[in-house]
Image (tube, grey):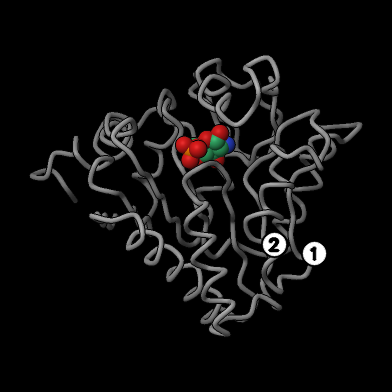
Amino acid sequence: MNILTFDSDSKLNEAAAGIIIGTVQTTPRAVLGLATGGTPVGIYKEVVREYDRGMISFRNAISFNLDEYVNIPSDHPESYHSYMNQHLFSHIDLPAAQCHIPDGNAADPDAECRRFDALIEQAGQIDLQLLGLGHNGHIGFNEPAHALIRGTHVVELAEETREANARFFDSIDEVPKQALTMGVGTILKAKKIMLVVKGADKADIVARALQGPITTDCPASLLQTHPHLIVLLDAPAASKLKLENLP
Ligand SMILES: N[C@@H]1[C@@H](O)[C@H](O)[C@@H](COP(=O)(O)O)O[C@@H]1O
């Protein structure tokens, strides 16, 4: 595990964007696993800035998003389809046919999950998986549970997750109760994982995820088992790590 801490948001975003861009530049048909939420917004902005400077083309890349809410129209401003278009896809030359996000409105959600997994399988391994971290330790929308699911599946969102994401909606009643999410098995199969966490409110969960026991109660703790995990933290998010125990 490689942990990097940053004293400014812009340096963190530049470093994370640099890792994404480096992967696309050095991998012939790079397969990117992409994330949503507040954390990656500045990273995508930096990627777009480099794209605008002519530093990178995504023409040959393929992307898979981690998750999508169930039952909100894909053009709803808070759907992850809208998020990705707004923050990344509409600004770069990644062909629409090569961007994959689970369809939260599929008539048969289980079939949609199998379709999504088959597409990932066909594309080969994910070269770089970008991850944020939920306050309860979720990755994608894999919530704490007795057992975690390997592939893409329908998940009931934890109340704390709905409360955390209510800031993006007019009220908590509008936050969907379910989502489709890539499973932890797929996430852990990525060749490289980049976990990005910002803010003092995540300091406790960062310490649990990276230095606590490996347990399904904190799905992000499974990342400790990954051979190529790079963690980018701002100083507040890193503040509860025990420096003497850093790997
Ligand atoms: N499903 C997403 C996750 O992929 C994200 O990493 C996490 C943290 O989000 P944020 O970056 O807004 O704190 O919660 C969301 O609900």
Circles 1 and 2: CB distance less than 8 Å?
yes
Disc 1/disc 2 C-alpha distance (Å): 8 Å
Say the numbered circle drawn on residue 96: 1
Q: Nearer the viewer, residue 126 or 163?
A: 163
Asked if residue 231 lies left or right of residue 168, the reply is: left
Is residue 45 in sight in this rendering? yes
Say which residue label 2 marks: 89
Q: On the rendered structure, is 63 left or right of 239? A: right
> Residue 19 appears at what percent x and percent y?
43, 68
Q: Is residue 46 above or below residue 204?
A: below
On screen, residue 150 above or below 11: above
Residue 111 % position (x, y) = 85, 37
The amino acid type, in three-letter code, at marker 2 is Phe
User: In the picture provided, is 52 more to the left or to the right than 130?
Assistant: right
Name the image quarter holding residue 158.
top right
Label 1 neighbourhood size at 10 Å, few (<14), some (14-19), many (20+)? few
Residue 119: mark: none
Please tell me how many numbered marks the rendered image carries.
Answer: 2
- Quick one: label 2, few (<14), some, or many (20+) residues within 10 Å? some
Nearer mark to the viewer, of 1 and 2 = 2
Secondary structure of the residue carrying numbered label 2: helix
Looking at the image, the residue that sits furthest to the left is 244
Report x, y in % for residue 164.
50, 25
Q: Is residue 139 visible to us here?
A: no
